[in-house]
Image (spheres, rainbow, N blue to C red):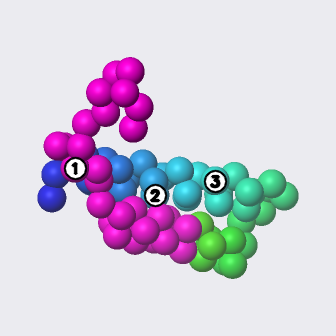
Amino acid sequence: MKISAMAKSLVAGLAAGATAAVTAVQDQVLTTGETVTIVLAVLGAWGITYAVPNRPATDRVVPGQGI
């Protein structure tokens, strides 16, 4: 596994977890259900990110020629 794939998964998990955590603590109380939601958001992001491969290195975009 390449570092870029691991970094992509880490960032996705952190972003999903942070988003769920910010939403959960709006009332300044963190319940068990909200904790489960945060954990599931992180695990879901990791799973989806793992399932979607990175773009191949040979598929390069040439400036001025579009995608």
Relative to 12, is 36 above or below?
below
Between 5 and 57, the one lying in front of the other is: 57
- Judging by the rendered image, the residue that carries numbered circle 2 is 13
Q: Is residue 29 left or right of residue 8?
A: right
- Left or right: residue 28 versus residue 9 is right
Q: Which residue is mark 3?
A: 19
Q: Mark 3 packing: few (<14 Cα in 10 Å), some, or many (20+)?
A: some
Looking at the image, do the residues carrying marks 2 and 3 touch, with CB atoms under 8 Å apart? no
In the image, residue 59 lies at what x, y percent?
Answer: 24, 43
- Disc ID at residue 56: 1
Q: Earlier in the sequence, mark 2 or mark 3?
A: 2
The relative height of residue 54 versus residue 31 in the rendered view (above or below) is: above
Vertically, is 12 above or below 58? below
* Earlier residue among tags 3 and 1: 3
Mark 2 to mark 3 CA distance (whole Å): 10 Å
Measure the C-alpha gap from mark 3 to mark 1: 29 Å
Q: Are marks 2 and 1 in contact (CB under 8 Å)?
A: no
Within the image, what quadrant is residue 65 found in?
Answer: top left
10 Å crowding of disc 1: few (<14), some (14-19), many (20+): few
Q: In the picture, which quadrant includes the N terminus?
A: bottom left
For the record, the magenta segment spans 39-67
Residue at the image position 42 percent from the left and 48 percent from the top:
11
Return the x and y of residue 31 as percentages of the image width and height. Answer: 72, 72
Kind of residue indicated by mark 1: Pro
Residue under the image location 69 percent in, 52 percent down: 22
Which one is in front, 50 or 17? 50
